[in-house]
């Protein structure tokens, strides 16, 4: 007998009604990205929130520029810029409470520092100095994840565990449009919905996965529509409208907190720069497309609103620019200092029990370093148990 010949189990979906039909309509995302700026509803936004967002966006843009400059100066190995995506980064961090957790991708350094992580420590991985430069437990920020979408099941696991323990914790996981094609995306969303886990997924649809444009990545009506197949609410928001992203994420986070389950938010934005400093975007996209998006820049949109409400004068503009400049100067100075590194640290904290291969490699490296230092000016012997 083959599987096809077997009778369906009682209660199996194909063997009879298992549960009442679910109306998918409330799960469906907006047909047009949700916006606040430039709409009558903008008048309702708290002025304090607008000015806070403005300061953070200006600081974020400056951070992006400084980090990119550091790659050119050989001080940073790689930097995936979020120029043009600052609204998503900042709003993600601001929607969370201190006890919540952020699960960032490699592109989300800005969200990480907006959450309170030291701007230099946030770059340690991208400098190639250490696996993660900050203690994830200090600010409840998971390591920047380079393997696409692997941070998503981690976020679901943490959120589910917190719920089982009765802890008031929401996890917000960030991923790119390309990351939504990964198996981990599917597994994370499926478990999140089945378990009703307090987790929010933020997809920053910046149009590209390196050189692959969205229309070659997905045939879905929108990436937010993917939520419906898992039985989860989908939301579509203009990712360059900072107060709109802030509102949608805050609603999703608070919904998760109150037991309302997970949400998938797609923020439509644009990657203004190349994938990283190691990429040449002119090989696969037209400059005119980039120019068109300049009209929809998150800082310009916010400035328009602030000006319209008389909330942004020259003094405030200057204060925001000066605060950003101070942060950049500090970043420059500290990133230009030679880091004190022990190459043997490569093997530390990789495995609790190092494999025989790792032990062998560690011994080789130690021998090379000792030889280089002419008989061992640097003592690496303390790392004999490398990997532990
Ligand atoms: C599992 C895995 N496969 C492939 C890669 C190589 N890779 C790095 S970035 C990237 C594109 C990701 O695009 P997207 O998810 O849209 O994020 P963005 O870079 O636009 O923020 C790819 C394929 C990787 N890091 N991990
Ligand atoms: Mg992308």
Image (cartoon, grey):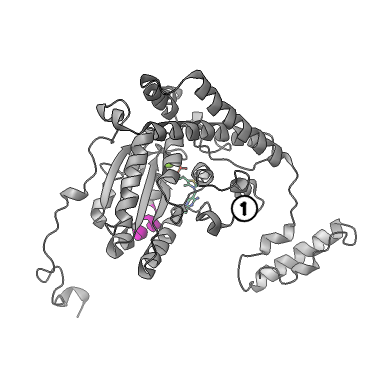
The residue under the point 56% across, 31% down is: 62
Query: In this rendering, would 310 be left or right of 334?
Result: left
Q: Is residue 286 visible?
A: no
**What secondary structure do most residues of the magenta stretch adopt?**
helix
Q: Which residues are magenta?
A: 182-188
Image coordinates for residue 100, horizontal then vertical, percent: 43, 55
Residue 200 lies, with reference to residue 37, above or below; the image says below
In the rendered image, the quadrant that contains the N terminus is: bottom left
Q: Give SS at disc 1.
A: loop
Q: Name the quarter showing ligand 2.
A: top left
Image coordinates for residue 82, horizontal then vertical, percent: 49, 37
Front residue of 367/29: it is 29
**Which residue was labeled with disc 1?**
133
Q: Is residue 165 visible?
A: yes
Front residue of 333/281: it is 333
Query: In this rendering, would 99 be left or right of 67?
Result: left
Q: Say which quarter of the image contains residue 243.
A: top left
Front residue of 387/196: it is 196
Front residue of 345/160: it is 160
The residue under the point 70% across, 68% down is: 386
Q: Residue furthest bottom?
A: 1
Q: Say which quarter of the image contains residue 53.
A: top left
Residue 72 lies, with reference to residue 347, above or below; the image says above
In the rendered image, the quadrant that contains the C terminus is: bottom right
Image coordinates for residue 317, horizontal then vertical, percent: 51, 23
The residue under the point 27% across, 27% down is: 39
Ligand 1 within 8 angstroms of badge 1 C-beta: no
């Amino acid at each position: 007998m083959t599987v096809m010949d077997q009778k369906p189990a009682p209660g199996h979906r194909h063997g009879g009604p298992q549960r009442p039909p679910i109306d998918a309509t409330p799960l469906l995302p907006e047909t047009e990205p949700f916006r606040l700026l430039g709409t009558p509803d903008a008048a309702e936004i708290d002025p304090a929130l607008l000015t806070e967002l403005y300061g953070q966006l200006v600081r974020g843009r400056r951070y992006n520029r400084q980090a990119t400059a550091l790659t050119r100066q050989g001080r940073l190995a790689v930097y995936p810029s979020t120029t043009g995506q600052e609204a998503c980064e900042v709003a993600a961090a601001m929607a969370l409470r201190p006890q919540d957790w952020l699960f960032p991708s490699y592109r989300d350094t800005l969200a990480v520092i907006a959450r309170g992580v030291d701007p230099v420590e946030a770059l340690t991985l991208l400098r190639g100095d250490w696996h993660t430069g900050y203690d994830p437990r200090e600010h409840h920020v998971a390591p920047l994840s380079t393997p696409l979408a692997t941070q998503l099941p981690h976020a679901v696991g943490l959120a589910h565990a917190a719920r089982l323990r009765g802890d008031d914790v929401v996890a917000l996981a960030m991923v790119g449009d390309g990351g939504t094609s990964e198996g981990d995306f599917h597994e994370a969303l499926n478990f999140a919905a089945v378990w009703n886990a307090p987790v929010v997924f933020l997809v920053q649809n910046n149009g590209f996965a390196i050189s692959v444009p969205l229309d070659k990545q997905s045939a879905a009506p929108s990436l937010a529509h993917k939520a419906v197949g898992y039985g989860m609410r989908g939301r579509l928001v203009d990712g360059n409208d900072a107060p709109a992203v802030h509102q949608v994420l805050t609603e999703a986070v608070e919904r998760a907190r109150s037991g309302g389950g997970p949400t998938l938010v797609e923020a439509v934005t644009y990657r203004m720069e190349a994938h990283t400093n190691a990429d040449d975007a002119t090989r696969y996209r037209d400059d005119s497309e980039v120019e068109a998006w300049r009209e929809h820049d998150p800082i310009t949109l916010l400035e328009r609103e602030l000006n319209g409400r008389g909330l942004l004068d020259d003094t405030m503009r200057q204060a925001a620019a000066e605060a950003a400049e101070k942060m950049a100067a500090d970043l420059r100075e500290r990133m230009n200092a030679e880091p004190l590194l022990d190459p043997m640290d490569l093997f530390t904290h990789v495995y609790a029990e190092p494999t025989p291969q790792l032990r062998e490699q560690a011994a080789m490296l130690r021998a090379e370093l000792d030889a280089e230092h002419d008989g061992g000016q640097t003592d690496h012997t303390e790392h004999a148990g490398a990997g532990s």
